[in-house]
Image: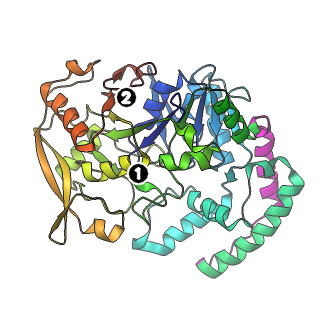
């Protein structure tokens, strides 16, 4: 294992604060790599009074000398990427071929993917998954189908692009009419012109990123692999079918970035001090009450990408143990610890009761999880703000006990603690990455 490298993944249903932790680590790395997901991800970084919301661009873009890589495992939306790049440049952030590299093998999110996403969700009605309607799922579906997929490299050759768009558009037109009774003319020349223009704008940044990263691994360069979404949304191991469409655990790094498994390095699992979820799906620890509303408002729990309100609830140690074991997490980063402050009492789910039986193992099957009731452990809350804490001993006794209980229940050290959105509100605790934080 390359111990210099770091993989950062979320251990819940996303929105754990991965961007903030990646930003803290990135300044000490040579490469920061997105290996999964697409523009449905929303990573937020605060720098002084400025707030940056990233959807496709890796969080290392704010640091000089860092190579930011969008790997082959990403569902790449060139429209979003171009908009994001231009927005960063307008804020005097340098973005170009020297610090942003896009895999030529990444699959492209096309306009028809977004249309298909909306049509599918509408057809499902109350049974819908609750996607972001960004076309991510349909893009990955076409990746698996292969004959209806377009890759980033195809955008650089107008003739190749025209041939593929012409062929695929005929398929999409027939599918949309048959499945959704939707008849819309797809203008081939307009589509080719639009996406060829994206290819022209991005051409200098498109490359064989897998070869670049394997060379970096061989040379001992430090790499941070930046996960998207959260482990409980993983296509294989999440709460299927209410999941995303890619492998978002540490298991997805080798295939999504094009590196050997030993390159994954030390794995940091991000844990929010409570739990939230966007969209449909089972959520045993959800508090659909005043407590959940209080956490939502205090934690500003609205989607970075969609603005949708997030469902909120207590910390779920059963789900967290599962996610941490799945990726082989070495240490935890406990974020948003400031948010529960002010509640008189806190609760952590330590087991489930399913069909009258107490179980301590997480079963991601949606049916079993929908029947699960949480067995809670109660802990005293803390009063007052902790945003000024810069070390563990600055925290009140109750907050320190909460951190220690998380460590005990998950069997892993809390290496990093975050008590607010700003860069300086993150400090090392029991981390072996103290030179990075």
Image coordinates of residue 304 in percent, x first then y, are: 45, 42
> Which of the numbered marks, if any, corresponds to residue 245?
none
Furthest toward the right, the residue is 159
Residue at left offset 21%, top offset 37%: 340
Q: Answer few, some or many: residues within 10 Å of disc 1's Cα (few below 14, many 20 plus, some between 14 and 19).
A: some
User: Which type of secondary structure does the marked residue at label 1 adopt?
Assistant: helix
Magenta-highlighted residues? 180-205
Q: How many marks?
A: 2
Image coordinates of residue 86 in percent, x first then y, are: 66, 33
Q: Main secondary structure of the magenta part?
A: helix
Say if the magenta span includes residue 199. Answer: yes
Residue at left offset 18%, top offset 30%: 399
Q: Check the image and report above or below for 209 versus 153.
A: above
- Can see residue 266? yes
Q: Quadrant of residue 338?
A: top left
- Can see residue 51? no
Q: Nearer the viewer, residue 232 or 211?
A: 211
Q: Which residue is mark 2?
A: 421
Left or right position of 292 against 54: left
Q: Earlier in the sequence, mark 2 or mark 1?
A: 1
Q: Which residue is mark 1?
A: 326
In three-dimensional space, the C-alpha distance between marks 2 and 1, rounded to whole angstroms, equals: 28 Å
């Amino acid at each position: 294992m390359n111990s210099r490298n770091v993989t950062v993944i979320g251990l819940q249903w996303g929105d754990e604060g991965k961007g903030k932790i990646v930003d803290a680590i990135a300044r000490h790395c040579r490469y920061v790599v997105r290996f999964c997901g697409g523009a449905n991800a929303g990573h937020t970084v605060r720098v002084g009074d400025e707030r940056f919301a990233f959807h496709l661009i890796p969080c290392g873009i704010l640091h000089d000398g860092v190579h930011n890589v969008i790997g082959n495992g990403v569902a790449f939306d060139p429209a979003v990427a171009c908009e994001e790049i231009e927005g960063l440049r307008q804020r005097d952030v340098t973005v170009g071929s020297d610090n942003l590299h896009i895999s030529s093998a990444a699959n492209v999110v096309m306009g028809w993917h977004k249309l298909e996403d909306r049509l599918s969700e509408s057809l499902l009605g109350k049974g819908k998954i609750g996607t972001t309607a960004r076309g991510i799922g349909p893009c990955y579906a076409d990746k698996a189908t292969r004959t209806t997929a377009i890759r980033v490299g195809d955008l650089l050759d107008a003739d190749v692009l025209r041939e593929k768009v012409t062929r695929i558009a005929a398929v999409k037109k027939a599918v949309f009419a048959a499945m959704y009774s939707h008849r819309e003319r797809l203008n081939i020349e307009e589509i080719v012109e639009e996406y060829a223009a994206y290819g022209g704008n991005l051409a200098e940044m498109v490359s064989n990123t897998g070869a670049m990263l394997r060379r970096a691994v061989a040379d001992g360069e430090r790499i941070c692999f930046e996960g998207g979404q959260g482990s409980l949304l993983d296509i294989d191991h999440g709460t299927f079918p209410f999941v995303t469409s890619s492998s978002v655990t540490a298991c997805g790094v080798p295939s999504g970035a094009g590196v050997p498994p030993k390159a994954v390095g030390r794995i940091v699992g991000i844990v929010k001090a409570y739990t939230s979820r966007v969209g449909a799906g089972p959520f045993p620890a959800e508090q659909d009450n005043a407590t959940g509303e209080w956490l939502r408002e205090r934690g500003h729990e609205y989607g970075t990408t969609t603005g949708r309100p997030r469902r909120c609830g207590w910390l779920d140690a059963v789900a967290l143990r599962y996610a941490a074991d799945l990726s082989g997490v070495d240490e935890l980063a406990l974020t948003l610890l400031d948010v529960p402050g002010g509640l008189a009492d806190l609760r952590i789910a330590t087991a489930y009761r399913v069909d009258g039986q107490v179980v301590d193992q997480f079963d991601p099957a949606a049916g079993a999880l929908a029947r699960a009731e949480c067995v809670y452990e109660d802990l005293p809350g803390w009063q007052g703000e902790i945003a000024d804490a810069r070390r563990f001993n600055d925290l009140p006794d109750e907050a320190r006990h909460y951190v220690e209980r998380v460590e005990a229940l998950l069997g892993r050290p809390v290496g990093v603690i975050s008590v607010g959105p700003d860069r300086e509100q993150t400090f090392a605790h029991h981390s072996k990455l103290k030179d990075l934080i």
